[in-house]
Image: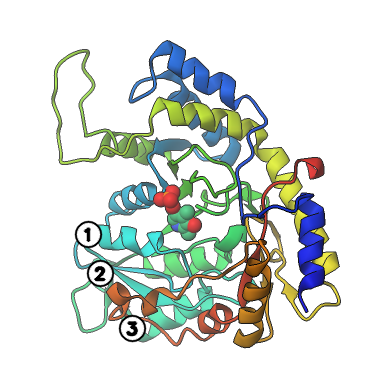
Amino acid sequence: MFSQLVEFIRAKYETKEFIPLHAPVFNGREEEYVVDTIRSTFVSSVGAYVDRFESDMAKYTGAEKATAVVNGTAALHTALILAGVQQNDLVLTQSLTFVATCNAIRYCGAEPVFLDVDLDTMGLSPLATSQWLADNAHLDSDGTCRLKGSHQAIRACLPMHTFGHPVKLDELIEVCKQWNIHLIEDAAESLGSLYKSKHTGTFGLLGTLSFNGNKVMTTGGGGMVLSNAELGFKAKHLTTTAKRAHPYEFFHDEVAFNYRMPNLNAALGCAQLEMLNTFVQAKRKLAQQYKSFLQHSELKFFQEPNDCKSNYWLNAVICEDRAQRDALLKATNECGVMTRPIWTLMNKLPMYQTCRSDGLNNANWLEARVVNLPSSVIQELA
Ligand SMILES: *Cc1c(COP(=O)(O)O)cnc(C)c1O
């Protein structure tokens, strides 16, 4: 039943071998820059590639400041701390996300609240958010948003741009303003994606990126915090052991982290960033080809939301029901074409089962139906 899809994918990738969901492509200056760090001996916590990667990424995204860190999870943790998230606070997020989003909330000692997603973005629903707040929150006399009948502050809202498709940012910003909550974007999957011509990750107080090996571009492992200049300065301080600048003295002014990205990884990042536009172009073309191939199929190809330009990090189809989803996963994986279901909802994982949530109707519906198809960059499409 799915053999034509398998054939189509094999023809695209021109191979009879195993086809992964997403593999990195190194066809730019990666080797040159990485070898340069080795020859210079500056592979670790000092070196020019980190500064260059940060300023190149700030330029690319339009963020005032970009701070490179060891991975996307560390970027989220840093961003949440800088937004003032503390022990016992609540942070609103989606149940349909990768586990790193809510792990970072827990690292702060805060509790995630799992809200529903929209069917046309697969990201946090502004309507669900505003509904939950109307039912459960109040603004106290100093303007802090708190849980009704409790002292717990609802400090931040952390939407995630699923598979590169931007959430409804205008509406979410409006809700956050109304309730005096900081917006932080988990843009780990959406580097290169635009919402109304502006880069995702630059709408909230802070935004975070990931450069893990399976993302749109990679540094091996890595992440970035996007922010204004003042928070960027704080992000750098907090992620580099809070050392006061001095030629040789050691003085640290708070308990901080060693989250700094090594120069070796930043070198890879500089070269990958030079290729990012061609990667995004190739991925968008592949998405169009999936879309036309699936036009008359029972599988519904998931398209970018209105007013958005998605990087189509992972292509996704929506099956008719769970049985069809399971059949598709089996048929493709059994013949060496890797496909994957979407994540198990966060509220179903043992460590998050007791967290607050809303009805999660759309999240449950999508969880039973979404399958990701192979999405690596095909160089000929760039
Ligand atoms: C990849 C990813 C992260 C961060 O992952 P790292 O592996 O720590 O870089 C965070 N959130 C989402 C949604 C992701 O997909």
190 lies above or below 226: below
Residue 98 screen position, x and y as percent:
45, 63
The residue pinned by badge 2 equals 153
Q: What residue type is disc 2 on?
A: Ala
Residue 342 screen position, x and y as percent:
54, 70
Q: What residue type is disc 1 on?
A: Gln
Estimate how packed mark 3 is, as few (under 14), some (14 to 19) or many (20 or more) residues with alpha carbons within 10 Å. few
Q: Are marks 2 and 1 in contact (CB under 8 Å)?
A: yes
| Image quadrant assignment for residue 370 | bottom right
Disc 1 is placed on an element classified as: loop
Residue 15 screen position, x and y as percent:
76, 50
The residue pinned by badge 3 equals 136
Give the position of the C terminus as an image quadrant: top right
Give the position of the N terminus as an image quadrant: bottom right
Alpha-carbon distance for marks 2 and 3? 12 Å
Estimate how packed mark 1 is, as few (under 14), some (14 to 19) or many (20 or more) residues with alpha carbons within 10 Å. many
Q: Which residue does the image show at 59% across and 60% down from the upper left?
A: 163
Q: Residue 217 versus residue 324: which sits nearer the camera?
A: 324
Q: Which residue does the image show at 68% across and 80% down from the upper left?
A: 319
Q: Residue 305 versus residue 216: which sits nearer the camera?
A: 216
Q: Residue 228 versus residue 34: which sits nearer the camera?
A: 34
| Image quadrant assignment for residue 171 | bottom right
Disc 3 is placed on an element classified as: helix
Alpha-carbon distance for marks 1 and 3? 20 Å
> Which of pointers 1 and 3 lies earlier in the amino acid sequence?
1
Judge whether residue 166 can be spotted in this image: no
Residue 311 screen position, x and y as percent:
66, 52
